[in-house]
Amino acid sequence: MLDLLVRNVNLPDGRKGVDIAIKEGKIVQLAKGIEAAAVSEIDGQGYLASPPFVDSHFHLDSALSLGQPRLNQSGTLLEGIALWGELKPQLTVESIKQRALAMCRWSISQGTLCIRSHVDICDDRLLAVEALLEVREEMQPYLDLQLVAFPQDGFLRYGRARENLLRALDKGIDVVGGIPHFERTMSEGAASIRELCEIAAARGLRVDMHCDESDDPQSRHIETLTYETQRLGLNGRVTGSHLTSMHSMDNYYVSKLLPLMCEAGIHAVANPLINITLQARHDSYPKRRGMTRVPELMNAGINVAFGHDCVMDPWYSMGTHDMLEVASMGLHVAQMTSLKGMQQAYDAVTVNGAKVLGLEGYGLEPGCYADLVILQARSPIEALQLKPARLYVIRRGKVIATTPEQQRSIMLGGQQQAVSFSTGLI
Ligand code: FE2
């Protein structure tokens, strides 16, 4: 007897009208017309069943703090960091936790069940670490939360960052972070990368650095991060987040850099919503877009994911943690409007993000965890076009969120007519 049988869904790879059989929290079979009894059944109506959305770059400690203690006037990264510094003395474990839990609920309702969140460790009380470790534990039945020890004020620039980072890792933070472009000099940035990668290698941890989040074409910390990854044998376990300086780099230099990143198995995470607004604030016209070179990275064989980064905090006033909005902005900014490009944008908020996090059992195949989202759309491209309702969000074979099917009607000439947003065009 199955626990759950999901009938008649389309899959992101193009398979149509498939049934998904689930038992003991795992997918046991995917096929058309499965004949087996189940405790419960869902009629998928030919809608898209997707593996859950993955947000590979987020900040749960600052989410939903917009306006505290004031708004970012310049719209820059640097004023955002200063503003967050003004708020830090007023934070409590409870306030961070309540905002983070509210954010997780928003995420779950929209089918995002895997989040990598950076946690600021440049607070000697480590309040955010304490709060988010509790959130990770409480949310564990519902989502995978991976935490990065993030020295927001600089690993070498902030006096107690090294000590705090090690304390955070000892408490159970999962990943080693960094911010080399915020150190005092380029050479200190490089030194911070070296030491942080050594810490990760010694502890067997992954690395995810905010790297070159700058409009400066000479900001080349990604080169050092790639070198240290090779030197320490961290291949496949290191992520460069943002990488916005690549947008402004010389084309010849990028042509040398991309193969090096590929060799080292570096993952890249672009944050399109945030970097289209934060970057190029010093430009007149034309204004640079400020997102890293997503199609070129992908074409070079590098795994690229999209992150949401922020929701209503000192860096970004918008957002609902909808990863389809992230993918949509990413494909616009990178001009990924071909069929292949749109499919790649969908991958960037699902399977590619899972590779960044190193998730096991992710995907819609027998043996994978029964974690999936059924969307009111027929395909990944239609999902990007319509940003539809997440009808069912399923975790380990149990429905943990539902949204009713959207139905709109208009009154024309005194007649009520249903409006269908299903296109079926491609
Ligand atoms: Fe970030």
Image: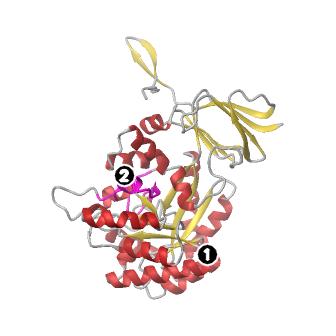
Circle 1 sits on which residue? 204
Q: Residue at x 30, y 73 (%)?
A: 219
| Left/right of residue 46 with respect to residue 253 in the rendered view | right
**Disc 2 Cβ-to-ligand 1 distance below 8 Å:** no
* Quadrant that contains the N terminus: top right
In the figure, is residue 362 to the left or right of 333? Answer: right
Kindly identify the amino acid type of the residue bearing the numbered disc 1: Gly
How did the renderer colour the structure?
A: secondary structure
Q: Measuring 56% from the left and 75% from the top, which residue is drawn there?
A: 127
In the image, residue 192 above or below residue 317: below
Name the residue at 78% across, 47% down: 24
Q: Residue furthest bottom?
A: 159
Sequence-first disc among 1 and 2: 1
Q: Residues within 10 Å of mark 1 (few under 14, many from 20)?
A: few
Give, as a three-letter code, the residue at label 2. Answer: Pro
Q: Position of residue 296 (x, y in %)?
A: 35, 55
| x, y percent for residue 408 | 47, 25
The residue identified by callout 2 is: 295
The magenta stretch is 290-319
